[in-house]
Image: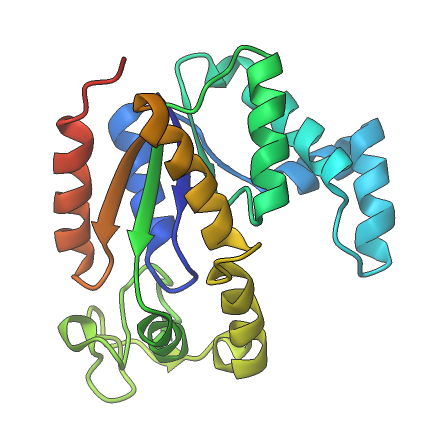
Amino acid sequence: MNVLFFGPNGSGKGTQGAIIKEKYGVPHIETGAIFRENISKGTELGNKAKVSIDKGELVPDDVTIPMVLDRLKEADCASGWLLDGFPRNLNQAVKLNEALAKEGIRVDVLIEIILEREIAKKRIMGRRLCVNDNNHPNNVNIEAIKPDGDKCRICGGELRKRDDDQDETAIDQRHGIYYDYKSGTRAAIKYFKDLSKRNGIPAVVEVDGRGSVEEVTKELMEKLGNLSLK
């Protein structure tokens, strides 16, 4: 099962991606990890990406997409993959789909965690990290996992804020790209949904991101379990 996985920062996409990975035994692939691996290995594409990154520029699509494609063709992807957060815009969606088609690879499922922008922002800014275990869920803006004052709700450890979680400008910039319906990530999602309307491929799974982790997981697993892939 080959999956494109979308959701705004703050939607819990990383958590759900890990659950899908374990459930279906497919690699959870993120472009950041692909960049790091290629740069560390000194590949031709990695060297090209490093030039852009060192300049503070976005890595060009003609570098990113071949890099992603190479990753999807590796042995551990033979039984499927979960591509997380890519493509990020409409142009990348078109180019990725064309590149996959040339290789005879298809996207079986598109998963979208739907969450309003303001809720996503509040969740990001409300996150608190336990010094004992960062995986302990604590968020001052989510009642179900609200900590006890400044102590972890799981172990009582001290809680800290991540600086980037409090940077409203950075959050707004990331969300600005994601929620852009004309050329951003939402436009990329619509592109694949429009493909689905033609023949049902990829199958589209939309999940309400407003619930608890357990509620989102339950809905996601039920909908994936009900799919009948062609």
Q: Position of residue 83 (x, y in %)?
A: 47, 35
Residue 126 appears anywhere in the view = yes
Quarter of the rendering occupied by the N terminus: top left
**With respect to residue 116, does 143 lie above or below?**
below
| Coloring scheme used | rainbow
Tell me the residue at 29%/87% (across/down). Answer: 150
Q: Report the residue at 40% width, 36% height from top.
A: 194
Picture quadrant where residue 103 is located: top right
Q: Is 202 left or right of 65, judged from the image as shown?
A: left
Q: Quadrant of the C terminus?
A: top left
Whether residue 2 is situated above or below residue 93 in the rendered picture: above
Q: Is residue 128 visible?
A: no
State which quadrant residue 17 falls in: top left
x, y (%) of residue 101? 56, 17
The residue nearer to you, when weighing 102 against 8, is 102
Image position, residue 143 (x, y; %): 16, 77
Q: Residue furthest front?
A: 198
Q: Reply above or below: 218 against 42.
A: below
Q: Quadrant of residue 193?
A: top left
Position of 76 compared to 95: left or right?
Answer: left
Q: Position of residue 151 (x, y in %)?
A: 27, 82
Residue at 12% from the left image edge and 45% from the top image edge: 218
Q: Nearer the viewer, residue 72 or 99?
A: 99
**Total marks placed:** 0
